[in-house]
Image (cartoon, helix red, strand yellow):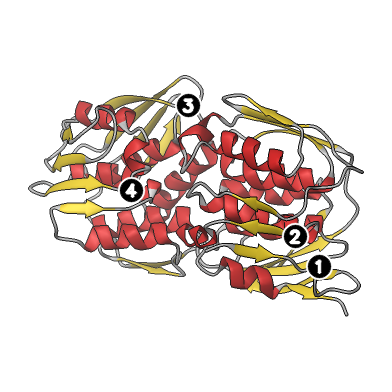
Amino acid sequence: MIKELNYFKDASSGIDVRGEVNISGSKSESNRLLILQSLFPGIKLKNLSNSDDTRYLQKALDSEKEVVDISHAGTAMRFLTAYFSSREGREVVLTGSERMQNRPIGILVDALRTLGADIEYENKEGYPPLRIKGRKLLEKEVSIQGNVSSQYISALLLTAPSLENGLRLKLTGDVTSVPYINMTLALLNDLRISCGWEGNTIFVDPKEEIEPITLTVESDWSSASYFYSLVALSEAGEVSLSAYKESSLQGDSSLVEIYNHFGVETTFEHDRIRLKKVSRHGNSFELDLSDSPDLAQTIAVTCFGLGMDCDLTGLHTLKIKETDRLVALENELGKLGAELTVTDKSLHLKASEGKSINRGISIDTYDDHRMAMAFAPLALKVPIFINDAEVVTKSFTDFWSDFESVIHLKS
């Protein structure tokens, strides 16, 4: 599906951004809690994400088939690799889409093998599909690189309380996406599972059962980022989003501070946030996104739309996402007329204020949901087309209807 975003043909005096949107639960929290719920059935969950990733994970956890296909759900691949490895007597072939079969997983597999897991590669060494023969994992100490995807680390930590001896996980080198690891530990704490992070070692003690408990998943902050961008690029936008906590576990809640720089004021009102366009600060922006790399595409597009310099670092994990996101940004922003360079871990955008944005460009999405949603707010500046627009369902099923509900044409 190609999505045409051309509001200018029907607006005689501009475009207004205002309204309210209810966003489903955080994909990151939902997927962690679903693994824990499978280990400890006393857990009940409310406001789960309605994303494709979460649905694929739920389906996989409920499946009794030998072949478990999680399509393009990267989180599910990492979490389920650890989960099935510890399910004694269960044998599965864990596979996914063509892109998933080219996303590396060897570091996690090596760590699980150290703990005693029986995992074999069906095709290419270091990549899915995986044949996993579940067994009791009795070893409790393992090391893993800290500068790879934090999902490898969380996959181990989520399975750890079900292991007979728990887990002591040593992180080597620099640690990436610390807020996501802290989220995992916070959720374990919520379930009264003993765990902690001391120096470069994380420990999780074993837990036999969980007392019945109901947990409500906070809405997804990364999904909120596209509305932050929309308000930033508007003339006087004001949008209300639910449901969010001021003391959030999600690293992407850093949006509040980041987008204040772009002229978006955030007010917390009960379980909602109100975004309002105010004056922005400066014409350049520099940020290390090691702790929240999923915001990189949205921020880069916002800066381009505002005509600002932009230097983003700490982006080394973007090369192993749904696509090589740095190359994808270089390609698509370049088509729109941006002057930018990327390295294997950074993006550098030169200011283009006063320079017109190329109109009517078709944005390729590379099977990546965040490419589609990050570029959509540019429709406030020029008509654009989004190719394969349905890819947004991976994380935000109702994105297009929610996006269009807050855009109003002035007569």
Q: Secondary structure at mark 3?
A: loop
| Position of residue 329 in the picture relative to residue 359 (left or right) | left
For the residues labelled 1 and 3, the Cα–Cα distance comes to 44 Å
For the residues labelled 4 and 2, the Cα–Cα distance comes to 32 Å
Q: Amino acid at mark 4?
A: Ser
- Vertical relation: 308 (above or below) 4: above
Instruction: Give x and y (percent) for residue 139.
Output: 19, 30
Kindly identify the residue that appears in the image at 46 percent across and 64 percent down: 49
Name the residue carrying label 4. Answer: 97
Classify 10 Å Cα crowding around label 4: few (below 14), some (14-19), many (20 and above): some
Do residues under tags 2 and 1 come within 8 Å of each other at their CB atoms? yes
Do residues under tags 4 and 2 come within 8 Å of each other at their CB atoms? no
Name the residue carrying label 3. Answer: 147
Foreground label between 3 and 4: 4
Kindly identify the residue that appears in the image at 55 percent across and 38 percent down: 325
Classify 10 Å Cα crowding around label 1: few (below 14), some (14-19), many (20 and above): some
How many numbered circles are shown? 4
- Vertical relation: 24 (above or below) 327: below
Name the residue carrying label 2. Answer: 383
**Which residue extends farthest top?**
173
Residue 42 disc label? none
Do residues under tags 3 and 4 come within 8 Å of each other at their CB atoms? no
Q: Secondary structure at mark 1?
A: loop
Classify 10 Å Cα crowding around label 2: few (below 14), some (14-19), many (20 and above): many
Kindly identify the residue that appears in the image at 21 percent across and 53 percent down: 68
* Viewer-side residue, 408 vs 187: 408
For the residues labelled 2 and 3, the Cα–Cα distance comes to 39 Å
Do residues under tags 2 and 3 come within 8 Å of each other at their CB atoms? no
Q: Quadrant of residue 17?
A: bottom right
Kindly identify the residue that appears in the image at 50 percent across and 49 percent down: 368
Q: Amino acid at mark 3?
A: Asn
Which is more N-terminal, label 3 or label 2?
A: 3
